[in-house]
Image (cartoon, rainbow, N blue to C red):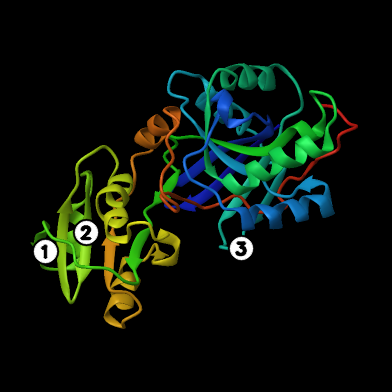
Amino acid sequence: MYVHEVDLGNGLMRRDVIAALRLEPYERRVVLPHERTHRGPKEDRLALMHATRASLEPLWFLYDGLQTSLRSLLSDAARRPPDVEFDDSEGLPQRLWRVPGNSWTSAVTTALAPLPVLIADGHHRYETTLAYAEEAGGPADAFSRFTLALLTDLDDPGLQVLPTHRVMKAGISVTGGEPAGSLNEVLEAIQGKVAAGVYREGRFQVLPLEGELAVVELHRQVIDNILGRRSPEDFLLYTRDPEEAVRWVDSGVGVSAFFLATPDLRQVLSLAREGKTLPQKSTYFHPKPPSGMVIHRLDADRTL
């Protein structure tokens, strides 16, 4: 087990646990997905696992540690100098503490055991690893029955989640919005509300939506109605830069842009617990754990 820390600058840090997480089918409601997956990416990832027989980077999961002692346990482990320090590809300092099996790891395991975990990043890789585990077989505690996991408290102050805006390549205009004077005005108006911003033909609007989570209701009430039976993936472009979305519409790449605020993670977790999935690219967590930081072998003949 490892404690991981990434320094985001300005005194802001995120602290995680890296561990082997037992693979569980979704129906057991232990590991909770919140986005749909597609066949192509899973085929590519399975080929990589066949070639390497290893997990080369941790899948990213969130847990609700509000009623646990996990935050203080992680702080205790990080009091000594780290075992490994390096800068990632973005220049962010990363630190690792290796913690051998002892009372601390037992306390962390006990605290995490009753908590469901939400997949933050790695839906395709998780489902691929499940498929690989079925192929590889092995006893219940075989390495192949686990995946490398980075686990983060959803209340960690260093956890950054960004919205992903949508640009439609075709479709009719949307009615019922309130006029807005600028992109900044739109982005400010949708914060903390179930609403989306709209840009079309040089004009901005704020579009109120009914429901709990704006990204879900934008698709259900607007995008799905416009597209009908047509696949959203054939008509949508995605960007985390709202100014880029405006440029795409102005240049004719798309006809309408839809802007979203940062999603409420507790609402995402609540929907996932109900078995509901969100539209593709509903969340974007940053910064992602680097590949190769820790490697988990997927041997079926070795046990933890």
Q: Quadrant of the N terminus?
A: top right
Q: Secondary structure at mark 3?
A: loop
Q: Secondary structure at mark 2?
A: strand
Inspect the image, locate mark 3, and give the three-letter code of the amino acid beneath it.
Ser
Residue at image mark 2: 197
- Mark 2–mark 3 Cα distance, whole angstroms, equals 33 Å
Residue at image mark 1: 180
Q: Tell me, yes or no, whether the two marked residues, 1 and 2, touch with CB atoms within 8 Å.
A: yes
Indicate the quadrant where residue 92 lies. Answer: bottom right
From the top left corner, tell me how far across and down residue 73 is, in percent: 57, 24
Q: Is residue 214 left or right of residue 86?
A: left
| Circle on res. 89 | 3
Q: Nearer the viewer, residue 36 or 75?
A: 36
Q: Indicate which label's residue lies in the foreground, 3 or 1.
A: 1
From the top left corner, tell me how far across and down residue 19 is, in percent: 68, 33
Q: How many residues crowd mark 2 within 10 Å: few (<14), some (14–19), many (20+)?
A: many
Q: Residue at x 31, y 77 (%)?
A: 247
- Residue lying at the far bottom in this picture: please name it: 251
- Residue lying at the far front in this picture: please name it: 229
Inspect the image, locate mark 2, and give the three-letter code of the amino acid beneath it.
Gly
- Mark 3–mark 1 Cα distance, whole angstroms, equals 38 Å
From the top left corner, tell me how far across and down residue 158 is, in percent: 45, 43
Q: Is residue 108 left or right of residue 1?
A: left
Q: Quadrant of the C terminus?
A: top right
> Would you place residue 19 above or below residue 51 in this image?
above
